[in-house]
């Protein structure tokens, strides 16, 4: 991580030049902001500003030690459309060059769509005790002090301060759920710390949530729902082969979004980690999700269909089912500038980078004339993971000021995706998008850490146990529902990310799923296997298998006996009555003489539920004597 504009330090001086906005009309009057900071004592500084080789302004500044001096200088933009630069020299040394654009305007104002992914994993244990605090301290914490509190709260401050700022927010269902739990119950941490619901910190969470709701109602923001526990859906659907998990988590996520946001009906969904596969088209469509956001580099460029510009929405069609969804493609490069080029040294450095970011956005708008330019990234991590988090708040505020100036100039308009769907018609169809993530790989979640594969196998086994149980009892019930709830949490991608690998959390939830299903399967036993007293080689005989079922439900299972001769090797479907013992006759033929183990197993969906090994003594068979 660095910054778009690197620090400019020389001889105890730091200096930058910015303008009041990055785009002007021909000959328009503007303002130059000269930003100079002295290090190691106050300094008298001679400055000069050049347009090419022509000096357009000069003067002398006295800059106090460790303070920034801001000088405002009028200037006039060039008369011809194009890109121009102004150079700053301090004490005759080149320090900075600022660029600006002159344009005569647009027939149609391009749209800019910010999509912020506000998310925290469901960081509680099966007993509802929290193991991690991030959903809460990113509201009431002081990560952004003195400019604000936590990033989730700071974003709502920007709604109030910047009325022309519109955006789309994925308030992930697991984040909303944790806020709601805190408001209704307070917070109990694994350490033993308890925050009562009357605490001022909880009240700030409640007030922050209220302000998001108000911004939704006013139309300033659109909210995307999502899969509840941030599952990497494309992987879970395509590789893990658990499409039902994805579908039910999305349905539950929708329920949480509607409930917590007072009935708001989201039309779009965030695809966690942009982990996509074509299976998701049907899942989204069937849940009345109309649009999502994917990546230009990893999804748009290799996509198939009627491709034109990545700066327009596309209809993604599943040709085999006729189901479809609208896809916006984020600009990966510009999104990464916000996400990762945010290490600022001080306010003037952050200000300079805010200008440069707005210029890069404006240049893209002027050159590409997009129908919609989409930037999508985490809403909190780019701030709290920066070298100096508070300065990202200062930067964000300045960036929005510059973007509002572009709106005032008719260069762009910030919109939510819901607004974009209403105003930008879809004209082209894609028929295939490759199964991948925003990283164009799944290695972060499977392969980068040596233990990941072992836990994927454990998770798959737990999932197969759930499916076997449901098939055995004739469908989902309250027990499998609880086990599914557990497996959702185990599959949350945040716990699998290589740098934040959390196997203890994964294992806790896998074990919870296993405990629930295991407690049911433990009530199914092979009570006894009765073998005839005389068993002869290659002669058919019947064994009696008594199956005890202490569950309240009839079971549909498969019974297998090994070793088996050819005609007896098919699994046999059986019905086991509830709360009792059911006997089954099993035909067998053993081909070897001597004491021989016999394996009797009860299976479902190729998973062994219970088994028993008994021993038979096989005698040699003597054929009848000749007559």
Image (spheres, helix red, strand yellow):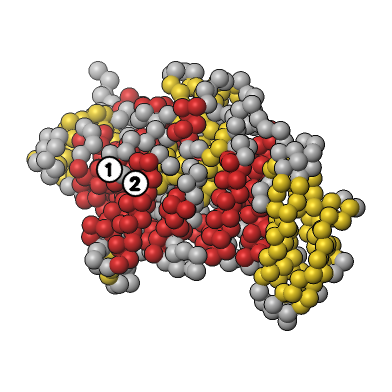
Say above or below: 626 vs 183: above
Looking at the image, which residue is at 66% across and 56% down?
353
Residue 618 seen in this snapshot: no
- Farthest-out residue, left: 580
Helix, strand or loop under label 2: helix
Residue 210 picture location, percent across and down: 32, 51
Apparent side of residue 352 relative to residue 254 in the rendered image (left or right): right
Say above or below: 579 vs 187: above
Looking at the image, which residue is at 40% across and 60% down?
139
The quarter of the rendered structure image containing the C terminus is top left
Residue 521 picture location, percent across and down: 22, 46
Closer to the camera in the image, 212 or 613: 212
Residue 229 picture location, percent across and down: 38, 47
Looking at the image, which residue is at 50% across and 44% down?
164
Closer to the camera in the image, 54 or 424: 54
Callout 2–callout 1 Cβ contact below 8 Å: yes
Q: Residues within 10 Å of mark 1 (few under 14, many from 20)?
A: few
Residue 262, which numbered label? 1
- Farthest-out residue, right: 53
Quarter of the rendering containing residue 596:
top left
């Amino acid at each position: 991580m660095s910054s778009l504009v690197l620090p400019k330090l020389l001889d105890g001086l730091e200096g930058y030049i910015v303008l009041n906005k990055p785009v002007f009309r021909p000959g328009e009057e503007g303002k130059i902001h000269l930003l100079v900071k002295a290090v190691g004592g106050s300094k008298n500084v001679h400055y000069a500003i050049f347009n090419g080789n022509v000096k357009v302004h000069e003067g002398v500044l006295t800059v106090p030690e460790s303070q920034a001096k801001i000088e405002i200088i009028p200037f006039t933009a060039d008369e011809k459309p194009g890109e121009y630069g102004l150079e700053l020299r301090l004490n005759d040394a080149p320090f900075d060059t600022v660029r600006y654009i002159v344009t005569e305007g647009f027939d149609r104002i391009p749209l800019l769509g910010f999509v912020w992914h506000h998310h925290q994993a469901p960081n509680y244990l099966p007993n509802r005790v929290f193991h991690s605090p991030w959903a809460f301290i990113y509201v009431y914490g002081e990560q952004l002090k003195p400019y604000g509190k936590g990033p989730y709260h700071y974003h709502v401050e920007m709604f109030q301060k910047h009325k022309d700022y519109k955006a789309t927010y994925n308030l992930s269902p697991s984040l909303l759920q944790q806020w709601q739990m805190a408001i209704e119950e307070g917070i109990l941490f694994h350490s033993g710390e308890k925050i009562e619901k009357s605490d001022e910190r909880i009240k700030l969470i409640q007030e922050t949530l209220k302000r998001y709701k108000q911004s939704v109602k006013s139309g300033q923001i659109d909210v995307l729902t999502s899969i509840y526990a941030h599952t990497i859906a494309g992987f879970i659907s395509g590789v893990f082969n658990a499409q039902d998990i994805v579908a039910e988590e999305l349905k539950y996520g929708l329920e949480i979004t509607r409930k917590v946001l007072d009935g708001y009906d989201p039309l779009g969904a965030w695809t966690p980690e942009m982990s996509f596969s074509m299976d998701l088209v049907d899942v989204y469509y069937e849940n009345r999700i109309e649009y999502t956001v994917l990546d230009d580099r990893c999804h748009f460029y290799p996509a198939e269909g009627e491709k034109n510009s990545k700066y327009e929405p596309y209809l993604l069609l599943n040709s085999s089912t006729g189901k479809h969804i609208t896809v916006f493609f984020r600009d990966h490069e510009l999104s990464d500038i916000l996400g990762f080029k945010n290490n600022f040294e001080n306010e003037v450095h952050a200000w300079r980078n805010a200008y440069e970011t707005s210029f890069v956005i404006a240049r893209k708008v002027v050159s590409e004339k997009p129908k919609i330019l989409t930037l999508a990234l985490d809403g909190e991590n780019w701030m709290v993971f920066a070298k100096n988090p508070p300065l990202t708040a200062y930067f964000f505020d300045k960036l929005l000021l510059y973007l509002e100036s572009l709106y005032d100039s008719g260069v762009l308009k910030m919109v939510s995706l819901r607004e974009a769907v209403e105003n930008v018609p879809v004209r082209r169809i894609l028929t295939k998008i490759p199964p991948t993530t925003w990283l164009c790989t799944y290695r972060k979640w499977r392969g980068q850490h040596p233990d990941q594969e072992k836990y994927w196998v454990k998770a798959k086994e737990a999932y197969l146990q759930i499916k076997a149980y449901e098939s055995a009892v004739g469908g989902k019930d309250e027990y499998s529902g609880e086990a599914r709830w557990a497996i959702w949490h185990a599959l949350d991608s945040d716990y699998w990310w290589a740098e934040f690998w959390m196997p203890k959390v994964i294992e806790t939830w896998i074990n919870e799923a296993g405990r629930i299903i295991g407690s049911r399967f433990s009530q199914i036993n092979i009570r006894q296997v009765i073998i005839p007293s005389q068993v002869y080689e290659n002669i058919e005989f019947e064994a009696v298998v008594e199956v005890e079922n202490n569950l309240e439900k009839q079971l549909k299972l498969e019974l297998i006996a090994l070793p088996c001769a050819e005609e007896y090797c098919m699994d046999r479907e059986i019905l086991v009555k509830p709360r009792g013992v059911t006997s089954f006759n099993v035909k067998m033929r053993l081909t070897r003489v001597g004491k021989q183990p016999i394996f009797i197993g009860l299976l479902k969906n190729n998973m062994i539920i219970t088994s028993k090994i008994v021993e038979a003594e096989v005698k040699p068979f003597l054929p009848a004597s000749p007559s």
